[in-house]
Image (tube, rainbow, N blue to C red):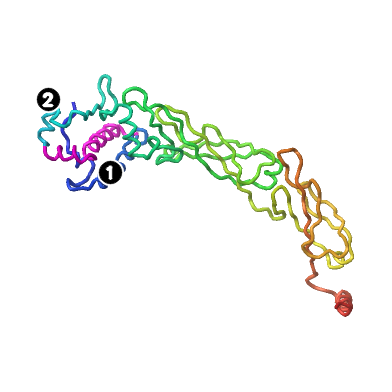
């Protein structure tokens, strides 16, 4: 049998507190003392007291009767006979056949209780809820919530261009702030993955509620900047440095590729920014083929000139224009 208690004191509010103040106090305390979050021995008992107090004070009519018939409410708890107007309110906090809240509405009352606390759709309703887990509003049995799968969580992982092109394995360490434990996993990076795509690690997400399975962890792929290549969709772009004379007269040049160096033929009259295509030297596609690579001409002028070079450049300048 539930003893009379000071509901205002339990929620830590004044007797003159507004409904919004009572609701805010309740939400804060319920989250703090929820048994699935707070593992202290007294958390469950405290959580039940908080729920009892809020069930009365949230309703203006019930609150008014509580304020008016405080002593009658106390006597009703001792005798088992509720005062007039309280027949529909029942609190069941354990004992044989008990174990949960019963707000006079069965499963729907339990669901509404959690919907108020954590938003529509269920207690801690979706992935990334107040506790990052995802609890279910569905009940099984009298006031007993059904098991619910944990919410999916997302993290980012930066990979190199070489890993993106060739695939590989990467070790990552996951830390659980609630327990302080860490776990090191080996993640397989599929060949041809693209920035923005996700790798799913099954069962490594938010904890399940009431015995439910954990959610998944989604690793969003970021691409580390590369010192030699730019990525344009399935294609790669790499600069190729050529001298002014090679750019003007044409010739050959060496350009970097993912597999090493490649020789390209440069047409005469190639200005800076011109692109020479190397077919099939880009990134792997899901279809099995590859994109292209473009060698982007960059004309490089010597920083210092010897006398002969200066004379020749001067003579060239005299013929320009």
**SS at mark 1 in the image:** helix
Image coordinates of residue 22 in percent, x first then y, are: 25, 44
Crowd tier of the residue under label 1, counting other residues whose Cα lies within 10 Å: few below 14, some 14–19, many 20 or above:
some
The quadrant of the image that shows the C terminus is bottom right
Q: Characterize the magenta stretch by its predominant secondary structure.
A: helix
Q: Which residue is at a point 34% across and 26% down the rendered structure image?
A: 144
The quadrant of the image that shows the N terminus is top left
Pick the front one: 85 or 136: 85
Residue located beneath label 2 in the image:
79
Residue 64 against residue 310 in the figure, above or below: above
Range shown magenta: 39-68
Task: Verify whether residue 67 appears in magenta.
Answer: yes
- 308 vs 300, left or right, is right
Residue 279 against residue 205 in the figure, above or below: below
Image coordinates of residue 148 in percent, x first then y, are: 43, 29
Task: Verify whether residue 215 appears in magenta.
Answer: no
Q: Which residue is at a point 21% across and 29% down the rendered structure image?
A: 88
Q: Earlier in the sequence, mark 2 or mark 1?
A: 1
**SS at mark 2 in the image:** helix
Residue located beneath label 1 in the image:
23
Image coordinates of residue 151 in percent, x first then y, are: 47, 36
Cα distance, mark 2 to mark 1?
30 Å
- 173 vs 16, left or right, is right
Crowd tier of the residue under label 2, counting other residues whose Cα lies within 10 Å: few below 14, some 14–19, many 20 or above:
few
């Amino acid at each position: 049998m539930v003893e009379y208690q000071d509901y205002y004191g339990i929620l830590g509010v004044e007797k003159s507190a507004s409904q919004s103040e009572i609701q805010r106090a309740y939400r804060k305390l319920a989250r703090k003392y929820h048994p699935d979050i707070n593992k202290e021995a007294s958390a469950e008992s405290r959580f039940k007291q908080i729920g009892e107090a809020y069930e009365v004070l949230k309703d203006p009519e019930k609150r008014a009767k509580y304020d008016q018939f405080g002593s009658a409410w106390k006597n009703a708890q001792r005798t088992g006979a509720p005062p007039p107007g309280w027949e529909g309110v029942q609190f069941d906090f354990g004992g044989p056949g008990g174990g949960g809240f019963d707000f006079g509405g069965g499963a729907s009352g339990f669901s509404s209780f959690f919907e108020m606390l954590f938003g529509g759709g269920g207690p801690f309703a979706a992935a990334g809820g107040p506790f990052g887990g995802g609890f279910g509003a569905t009940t099984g049995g009298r006031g007993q919530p059904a098991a619910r799968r944990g919410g999916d969580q997302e993290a980012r992982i930066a990979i190199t261009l070489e890993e993106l092109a060739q695939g590989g394995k990467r070790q990552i360490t996951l830390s659980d702030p609630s327990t302080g434990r860490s776990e090191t996993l080996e993640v397989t990076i599929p060949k041809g993955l693209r920035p923005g795509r996700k790798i799913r690690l099954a069962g490594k997400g938010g904890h399940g509620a009431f015995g439910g399975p954990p959610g998944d962890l989604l690793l969003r792929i970021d691409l580390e900047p590369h010192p030699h290549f730019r990525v344009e969709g399935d294609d790669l772009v790499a600069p190729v440095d050529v001298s002014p004379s090679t750019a003007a007269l044409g010739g050959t040049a060496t350009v970097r590729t993912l597999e090493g160096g490649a020789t390209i033929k440069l047409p005469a009259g190639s200005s800076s920014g011109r692109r020479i295509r190397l077919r099939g030297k880009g990134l792997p596609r899901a279809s099995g083929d590859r994109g292209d690579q473009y060698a982007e001409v960059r004309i490089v002028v010597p920083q210092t000139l010897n006398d002969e070079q200066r004379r020749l450049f001067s003579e060239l300048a005299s013929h320009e224009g």
